[in-house]
Amino acid sequence: MHQQLCCQVVKNIPGKKTTSLISVLAIAIFGSACTPIRESSSVTLPNAAQSPANTTKQSGEEQATVTMAINPWQVSVDQEQKLQPLADYLSKALKRPFKFKITKDYQTAVDSLVEGKVELAYIGPGSYIAAHLRDPKIEPLVSSINQDTKRPWYTSVIIANKASGIKTIPDLKGKRFAFVSKLSTSGYIAPMAHFQKLGINPEKYFGSVIMAGSHDKSKQALAKGEVDAIADDRRSYTQQVKEGKMSPKKYTIIWESVPLPSVPIVASSKLSVELKDALKKALIEAPEGLIDPSGAAGVGYTLVQDGDYNIIREFQKRVSSK
């Protein structure tokens, strides 16, 4: 399986030695060097010497609001409040209004992007691939760097309630399990690919299976005792542990995936090249500590391209061929 991961960490990763280490780790894990950034993905602002037609177009764009759709990772109200500083920063950097739109589910975020109802979307790798299949001109621009690992990837985990006696995957037999959404990479695609590898059919193996709809709702179901285990994003779980919303004394991680390429900020096919470049530059130069679209404190962004998500395509093939 050819696996690619763009690991050109452009900001906030201290020193050349750290950047080199990231590249070495990526090569060791994925078995291939990081994908070079394409020339068309270079981060440059529009040339000041534009034709009158281009200048007129850009003047019109400056007045329009840029909207970014976001999957419902957390409760919408909390998510919107956390993201306001980032919206303010991007409004200033792009010199035009900027806002986030929390969608009701994963499919709505994909539909909004494909149908041109929003200019941008912060969607998981699985959702990006679904959108790209419908419109090949949709393009991933950047992805955030994981706050805990300082690397441009994250992992999927299976978290169990310790009181249920679950310590290993075989212990899940007959238990109640929650996925997030079939479009969620960490909340469905990655763990399902692992279950398929083990010959496990969740519908037959588990006592019951639900689709919670968001990472936050799946953890709520676990906390309320409605399920015994869940598939989740380790980053999301770690954040709730830090906030005191979940206790590691009550829950345990029984499985963790290989590193997955970070969630991308994706541009609609209708977005101009000038605005794409301006957005990439603004995010790469964003101050450290600014909350990123996932709701976590950001430590920077890295450029990404379509090929970086081939590992997820391979997982999807396993799941769909089940």
Image: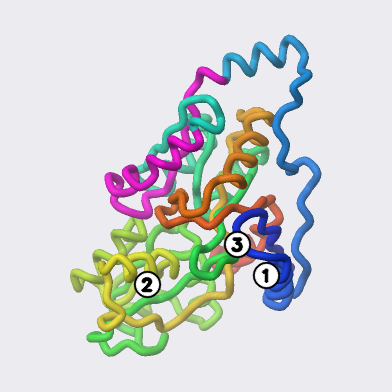
Residue depicted at x 69% and y 14% = 55
As drawn, 22 above or below 301: below
The one of 235 and 136 positioned closer to us in this rendering: 235
On screen, residue 51 versus residue 115, left or right, reads: right
The amino acid sitting under disc 1 is Thr
Residue 184 at x, y = what percent?
A: 46, 58
Label 3 sits on a secondary structure element that is loop
Distance from label 3 to label 1 (Cα)? 13 Å
Q: Image quadrant for the N terminus?
A: bottom right
* Amino acid at circle 2: Glu
What residue range appears in magenta? 62-90
Q: To which residue does mark 3 refer?
A: 152
Give residue 203's mark.
2
The location of residue 303, given as percent across then percent down, is: 67, 51
Q: Is residue 84 visible?
A: yes
Of badges 2 and 3, nearer the viewer stands 3
The numbered mark, 3 or 1, whose residue comes first in the sequence reads 1
Q: Does the magenta stretch include residue 63?
A: yes
- Asked if 26 appears above or below 121 in the picture, the reply is below
Question: In which quadrant will I find the C terminus?
Answer: bottom right
Q: How far apart are marks 2 and 3 (CA)?
A: 33 Å
On residue 303, which mark appears? none
Q: Which residue is drawn at 68% across and 61% down?
A: 7
Residue 291 position, x and y percent, is: 43, 51
The residue under label 1 is 18
Identify the image's colour scheme: rainbow, by chain, secondary structure or one colour.
Answer: rainbow
Asked if residue 272 is positioned above or below residue 289 in the image, the reply reads above
Please indicate, yes or no, whether residue 321 appears anywhere in the rendered image.
no
Q: Which of marks 2 and 3 is nearer the N terminus?
A: 3
Q: What element carries label 1?
A: helix
**Front position among marks 3 and 1:** 1
From the image, state whether disc 1 or disc 2 is nearer to you. 1
